[in-house]
Image (spheres, rainbow, N blue to C red):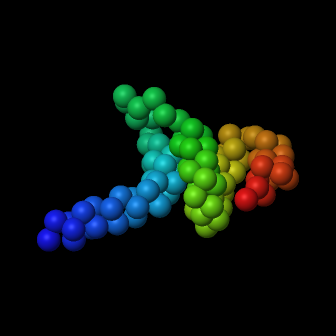
Amino acid sequence: MAHTSERCKRQCYFREAYYAAEMHRLRGELLLRAEGGVRGVALTPEACFQKALSIARSQQAKALELRAATSLARLWQHQGKRQEAYDFRKSPQAHAS
């Protein structure tokens, strides 16, 4: 019984770790949609998207990396930073494995 419980805990941890990138991305999306910002939150949507990219890359989770990169590009487009988004997309870092 203890072995089964420990195994379940490990599986839950790894499942949560796999989705850490998506959780950071979603946090960024929620911060974007919060009118007037969120009190007591020091994070910015951009920081959340960058963290999501970093985690997805370290896990080699291409689908999650693409989602985070898309959210970041949308943010930059909304902020009028089209050149930054274009440069990022063309950079070797954007295509790194």
Quarter containing the N terminus: bottom left
In the depicted structure, whether residue 85 falls above or below residue 15: above
Q: Residue, x 53% and y 36% (percent of image)?
A: 44
Q: Nearer the viewer, residue 54 or 87?
A: 54
Q: Where is residue 32 in the image (x, y as percent from the top left)?
A: 51, 44
In the rendered view, does 97 fall on the left or right side of 53? right
The answer to which quarter of the image holds residue 96 is bottom right
Quarter containing the C terminus: bottom right
Residue 86 in sight: no
Residue 96 in sight: yes
Q: How many marks?
A: 0
The answer to which quarter of the image holds residue 61 is bottom right
Q: Nearer the viewer, residue 72 or 65?
A: 65
Q: Which of 73 and 17 is in front in this view?
A: 17
In the rendered view, does 73 fall on the left or right side of 36? right
Identity of the residue furthest to the left in this view = 1
Q: Residue, x 61% and y 67% (percent of image)?
A: 63
Q: Position of residue 48 (x, y in %)?
A: 53, 43
In the rendered view, does 43 fall on the left or right side of 47? left
In the depicted structure, whether residue 5 falls above or below residue 79: below
Q: Position of residue 37 (x, y in %)?
A: 45, 34
Q: Nearer the viewer, residue 91 or 16?
A: 16
Q: Where is residue 76 in the image (x, y as percent from the top left)?
A: 69, 44
Q: Residue, x 16% and y 65% (percent of image)?
A: 2
Q: Residue, x 49% and y 49% (percent of image)?
A: 24
